[in-house]
Amino acid sequence: TFAWFGATSSKGISMFCIGLIAIAFLLCASLLQPSFASHAAGDRLKHFYKRILRKDVKRCPDKTKLLPNCTDCILGLQKAPGSESCDEFIAGTKAIRRELKMITERRFGNKTVADRPFGVYPYLERPDFLIRQITFGYIMSSPDDGIPPVRHVMDIGAYYNPINLFLSPEVCPESVTVIEPILDALSVYVPCASDHSKHTHFMILPVTFHNFVLFAASYPKPDALVCIGCDAHYGTSRKLLETTFAKPFTLYLEYPLGYKPDEVFEEMNGQEKGERLLYKLLIQPNTTATPYTKRMMKVIHYTEVNATSSDRN
């Protein structure tokens, strides 16, 4: 269960519909066996991995290379000495994965889930936390006069819950870029469910956002930027969120209240020039797995660069 506090939204975003979807999901999840309910997103991820094994999915002959040219390594990978394939992770990604795997094994021992070797935070896959992805996925799948249809989606720090798993099957963006060091590198063209003549380029880049920024110009500019569980200390800063990409774009931001580094996100309310707050929701999952149970969700649309953004952290 979780508490759902006051919310605001712009014209066109139906709070009633979002509320019904959230409640229905939580009620259904509560009827499932705990082992299944706690890994609901894991099933979504497994289905996605099975989907991309079909013959209609295109990838490079060397799957470690990036479409469409199939010459460059997928960001986060590099060629080992004497190899033509990008068959090893870059040093920074290796270090992150090594540390998280050690923490996971120390924390859970022989209870570590085989397909979650870096699953330090299993509660993030429980229904009351997945409501964050479900809510943003619903909003992104239901464009209106406040939020344009998504074409290029970027998800920063997705954990095992990439946002594409929560979009409606009818939604077919041109690209989805997932920036997450614990996921394996991927570059595939998947046909749209609604129109097989079109496809989505799904990319999983096993790097940090700080590393990605150095190469951002080589990747699609997002019009939908997602940061769930955003962490201004270990993850990305407000400045990077607001200034890395040219406007316009819509930011889907979620973060814990009471976590001091994230106080900078509290000031982001769409009140500056060229900004508009489209949605705001406070939730509180019922868990003891983390002290940061009060969570804030915001959707902010940016139409131009804020002149004072360079002074922000």
Image: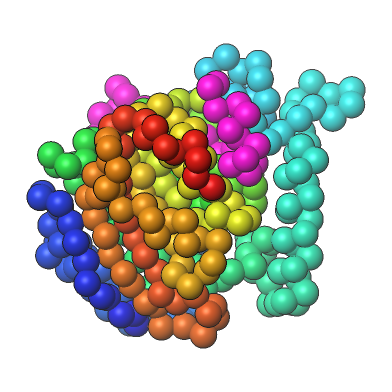
Residue drawn at the location 39% of the way across and 32% of the way down: 307
Q: In this view, does 181 lie to the left or right of 248?
A: right
In x, y percent, where is residue 142? 19, 46
In x, y percent, where is residue 195? 25, 29
In x, y percent, where is residue 291? 53, 80
Residue drawn at the location 34% of the way across and 79% of the way down: 2
Pick whichever, 245 or 168, lies toward us.
245
The N terminus, quarter of image: bottom left
Tell me, yes or no, if residue 132 can be seen here. no
Residue drawn at the location 33% of the way across and 72% of the way down: 283
Tell me, yes or no, if residue 11 can be seen here. yes
In which quarter of the view is residue 151 placed?
top left
Q: How many marks?
A: 0
What range of the chain is rendered magenta? 190-218
Residue drawn at the location 54% of the way across and 67% of the way down: 260
Pick whichever, 111 or 13, lies toward us.
13
Q: Is residue 141 left or right of residue 262?
A: left
Vertical comparison of 2 with 39: above or below: below
In which quarter of the view is residue 51 placed?
top left
User: Can residue 302 be found in the magenta stretch?
Assistant: no
Pick whichever, 159 or 212, lies toward us.
212
In x, y percent, where is residue 65? 64, 25
In which quarter of the view is residue 220 placed?
top left
Pick whichever, 18 or 68, lies toward us.
18
What's the colour scheme?
Answer: rainbow
User: Can residue 200 be found in the magenta stretch?
Assistant: yes
Vertical comparison of 192 with 178: above or below: above
